[in-house]
Image (tube, helix red, strand yellow):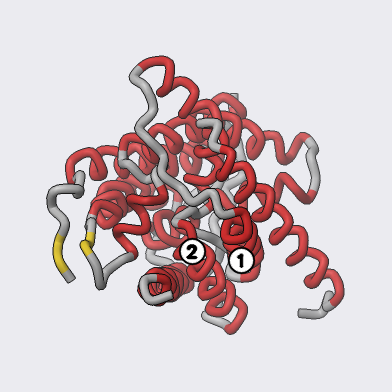
Amino acid sequence: MPLMTALVAGFLFGLGLIVSGMVNPQKVLAFLDVAGRWDPSLAFVMLGAIPVAAFGFFRMRLRQRTFLGQEVHIPEPGLIDARLLIGAGLFGIGWGMVGYCPGPALAGVGAGSASAVVFVGAMVVGMCFYRFLDSLFPGK
Amino acid sequence: MTLDWESATPLASLLGGGLIGLSAALLVVANGKVAGISGILAGLLQRLDQRNAWRLAFLLGLLFAPIAYEVLWGMPEIVVTTDKGLLISAGILVGFGTRLGNGCTSGHGVCGIARLSLRSIAATAVFMTTAMLTVGIGRWV
């Protein structure tokens, strides 16, 4: 059953990316292009997504287990440190270069886009490279 | 800045966003997990065992959505660069940056802001800013 709900959640996420237009990197870039002809659509996506997601998180905030008996894993509040800020900064640069963040890139792979396949391949390499560097400095 | 209302799709984007929010809500209410795509993918790369099966199921659902949409309604056009050098360098930055910063647009931008996490609000402000700067600089080169 937990696999079924995860599958449905993934499907809904993909559907949302398509319906909202965010599978198209050009539309994402048009949002990021604040100095040019600005397409505010991505702001509406956030506006639609955040309150609905907030309802789910609010319901689960004090619970240890879900109705399916699954453990609840919600990150504890933490410090805003250099890793967070530098990581987010690097991610933003990559995002602004082609307009792909991880969700739409994976949906692009599902849609059969060759560019999305190349991007996701490189993204996996970047993630593995991080793990490698992280394993060199275990104390951090 | 000029507002491009002709290309803007406020209703469709609001509705699509609602579906993304519903996905995040379902995943936390049923599975107790945060719908952060970069984290889900990275966890799957670490090890593929029973504890991680939900990640695989989520990603399969995500990959299947465009296929189902294509069959039912026809997929919208996807316009993306074919410049391999650009795709590869951007992909590496996104992969590395999302691990170092513990999340992307979904984990920080949607779920993190939804649960009022200060870390996520800071991360979202930073990646929005560097992405906008990158696009802005790209216009001049």
Give the camera-side residue of A125 and B34. A125
Mark 1 neighbour class, 10 Å CA radius: few under 14, some 14 to 19, many 20 or more: many
Residues at badges 2 and 1 in contact (C-beta under 8 Å)?
A: yes
Taking A35 as reference, is B68 left or right? right
Q: Is residue B46 visible?
A: yes
Residue hosting label 1 = B93
**What secondary structure is marked by label 1?**
helix
The image position of residue A22, as x and y in percent, is: 37, 45
Residues under labels 2 and 1: Cα distance?
A: 10 Å
Residue name at image x 70 percent, y 50 percent: B43
Residue name at image x 29 percent, y 49 percent: A45
Residue hosting label 2 = A97
- Above or below residue A88? Residue A73 is above
- Above or below residue A61? Residue A12 is above
Q: Is residue A67 visible?
A: no
Residue name at image x 70 percent, y 52 percent: A124
The image position of residue A9, as x and y in percent, is: 48, 34
Q: Residue furthest top?
A: B72
Query: What type is the residue that disc 2 sits on?
Result: Met
The image position of residue B12, as x and y in percent, is: 23, 38
Give the camera-side residue of A5 and B75. B75
Mark 2 neighbour class, 10 Å CA radius: few under 14, some 14 to 19, many 20 or more: many
Residue name at image x 49 percent, y 64 percent: A97
**What secondary structure is marked by label 2?**
helix
Query: What type is the residue that disc 1 sits on?
Result: Leu
Quadrant containing the C terminus of chain A is bottom right
